Amino acid sequence: MFQRLCLLVIGLSSLVTVARAEGDAATALAASIQRHYDQVRDFQADFTHTYVGGILRKKTVERGRMAVRKPGRMRWTYTQPEEKLFVSDGNRVYSYVPADKQVYVAEVPPDDQATTPALFLAGKGNILKDFTVAPADVPDAPSGSVALKLTPRRPEREYDWLNLVVDKSSLALRMLVTSDSQGGLSTFAFTNLRENTGIADKEFVFVMPRGVDVITDAGH
């Protein structure tokens, strides 16, 4: 009995040691990613957005092109299967689906209130400050990449956690995976990513289309 207890204690101690080592490694990786990201002024890439959710676990796949320039400027152009456009000029976010003939306009939240993973990419957030970090296993992650699970330190409306996947050597972004409160899984996979190319201001200017209804976050 005593021998069995000793083996159990040793086993638990080993698990704690391994967990601590994994936590330390995750924290070190997060710090390295943040240092790299602090040096990135802008980036652009092709993306594939996959969402699986709902009672029937319905899967949708969309594709397009994105551009980000810190702080807070973004342009997400969806081209397949439906055209959609999301633009942030640093002050306002414009959401436009041509088929709906509507434009939704919302204020960009302050840095300490940014909620969406997209705004996190746009420089409104800090990995170690805003999240607890842990190693992550992302099944569809490309070879030569590493992943972290980031859990927000305060509850967020739009997601429960996110997995950040980066290239192991360059630390460039490869994937962003988020889970929402309904159990839906949203995955952005990035290819042809380029950093610090000097993206022009005009990329983040939204030109209001003619004949659309404009809906603000105040509801008018």
Image (cartoon, grey):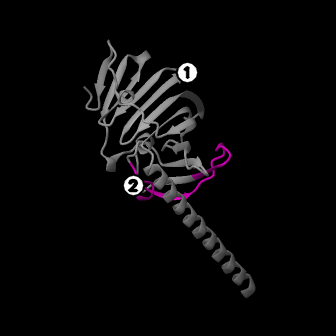
Q: Which residue type does callout 2 highlight?
A: Arg
Q: Is residue 178 left or right of residue 74?
A: right
182 in relation to 161, above or below: above
Q: Which residue type does callout 1 highlight?
A: Pro
Return the residue found at the far bottom.
Answer: 2
- Where is residue 24? Give x, y as percent: 55, 66
Query: Foreground: 55 or 132?
Result: 132
Of mark 1 and mark 2, the one earlier in the sequence is 1
Contact between marks 1 and 2 (CB within 8 A): the answer is no
**Residue designated by label 2:** 154
Other residues around mark 1 within 10 Å, as few (<14) / some (14–19) / many (≥20): few
Other residues around mark 2 within 10 Å, as few (<14) / some (14–19) / many (≥20): few
Q: Is residue 103 magenta?
A: no
Q: Quadrant of residue 19?
A: bottom right
Residue 51 seen by the camera: no
Q: Secondary structure at mark 1?
A: loop
Q: Is residue 130 magenta?
A: yes
* Placement of the N terminus among the 4 image quadrants: bottom right
Q: Which mark is residue 81?
A: 1
Q: Residue at x 29, y 32 (%)?
A: 217
Query: Foreground: 18 or 122?
Result: 122
Q: What range of the chain is rendered magenta? A: 125-147
Q: Is residue 129 left or right of residue 186?
A: left
Q: Which mark is residue 175?
A: none
Q: Residue at x 51, y 29 (%)?
A: 65
* Placement of the C terminus among the 4 image quadrants: top left
